[in-house]
């Protein structure tokens, strides 16, 4: 073999020998991050965002009205920036509400729908699908903004403490709590890293990423549905839609995400 060819062959052999070492430097989290990056430009959540915006501006319901006067916390009709400040206290209902429960209030008072009936409807069915699409669009209007949940009202602070209790509460046949999966760094499930939601994640991978499109199920999931599925995995009974416990968990996780950039609606495994 001529000298130049011998040098090339030796170089290729050296490269091949190093290949396993290179492969080992890439973690499962890196691979999943690359996977999500490839899907971002074609995130199906965009279709739900478009649907949600149209539903917001379309006169519907027994009162044949739009939702354009719905107050999400920043004044009637103000959408931009509202998502990153929810859940929060609302004086007109006397409740701390998250995005989904607030939408139920607006759909009932402005459009004449029954909030009770919508809350009892299965996910992805009937007006529940409307709530999901609206949540996708409203959250998209705050994409890139920092999470800034208020804690000035006594009830907001109370819900934070209630959410903290619920997060660490262990029960059920598996003796699980939210903290079992999301209470410390370094945990993962099915090769996917689990964010620690007890402290500021700083990158929007936890609370600040929902609503999100779930590739595994081919569906758009609201935060309420995400929490519902967490209770299922803990073998707990399903909580009521927009119940105080799910809203309190939202307050706890949202306050802990203070300053994290919202990437909702994101795309998830």
Image (cartoon, rainbow, N blue to C red):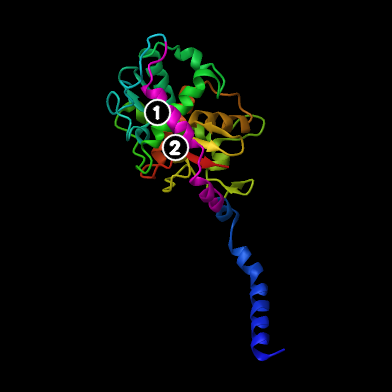
Number of marks drawn:
2
Identify the residue shown where x is 53% and y is 16%: 120
Quadrant of the image containing the N terminus: bottom right
Mark 2 Cα within 10 Å, few/some/many (few <14, many 20+)?
A: many
In the shown orientation, is residue 237 left or right of residue 141? right
The numbered dot on residue 253 is: 2
Q: Position of residue 59 (x, y in %)?
A: 38, 16
Q: Which residue is mark 1?
A: 53
Identify the residue shown where x is 59% and y is 35%: 218
Q: Which residues are magenta?
A: 33-61
Q: Position of residue 185 (x, y in %)?
A: 53, 50
Label 2 – label 1 distance at C-alpha: 27 Å
Quadrant of the image containing the C terminus: top right
Above or below 146: residue 232: above
Mark 1 Cα within 10 Å, few/some/many (few <14, many 20+)?
A: some
* Nearest to the observer: residue 235 or residue 31: 31
The outermost residue toward the bottom is 3
Magenta region, mostly helix, strand or loop?
helix
Q: Position of residue 145 (x, y in %)?
A: 34, 42
Q: Is residue 241 magenta?
A: no
Q: Quadrant of residue 56?
A: top left
Above or below 23: residue 198: above
The numbered dot on residue 197 is: none
Above or below 196: residue 31: below
In the shown orientation, is residue 237 left or right of residue 205? right
> Can residue 79 be seen by looking at this rendering?
yes
Q: Quadrant of residue 175?
A: top right
Asked which secondary structure carries label 2, the reply is: helix
Above or below 20: residue 4: below
């Amino acid at each position: 073999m001529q000298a130049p060819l011998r040098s090339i062959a030796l170089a290729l052999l050296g490269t091949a020998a190093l290949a396993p070492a290179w492969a080992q430097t890439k973690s499962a989290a890196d691979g999943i991050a690359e996977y999500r990056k490839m899907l971002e430009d074609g995130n199906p959540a965009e279709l739900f965002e478009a649907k949600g915006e149209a539903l917001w501006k379309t006169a519907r319901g027994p009162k044949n009205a739009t939702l354009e006067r719905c107050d999400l916390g920043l004044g009637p009709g103000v959408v931009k920036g509202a998502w990153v400040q929810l859940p929060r206290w609302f004086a007109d209902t006397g409740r701390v509400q998250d995005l989904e429960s607030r939408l139920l209030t607006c759909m009932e008072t402005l459009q004449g729908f029954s909030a009770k009936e919508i809350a009892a409807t299965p996910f992805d069915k009937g007006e529940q699908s409307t709530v999901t699409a609206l949540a996708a669009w409203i959250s998209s209007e705050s994409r890139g903004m920092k999470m800034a949940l208020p804690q000035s009202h006594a009830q907001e602070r109370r819900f934070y403490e209630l959410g903290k209790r619920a997060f660490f509460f262990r029960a059920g046949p598996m003796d699980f709590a939210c903290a079992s999966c999301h209470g410390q760094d370094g945990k993962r499930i099915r090769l996917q890293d689990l964010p620690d939601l007890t402290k500021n994640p700083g990158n929007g991978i936890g609370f600040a990423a929902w609503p999100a499109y779930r590739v595994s199920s081919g569906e758009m999931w609201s935060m309420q549905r995400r929490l519902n599925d967490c209770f299922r995995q803990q073998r707990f009974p399903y909580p009521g839609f927009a119940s105080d416990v799910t809203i309190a968990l939202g307050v706890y996780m949202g306050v802990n995400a203070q300053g994290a950039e919202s990437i909702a609606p994101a795309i998830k495994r």
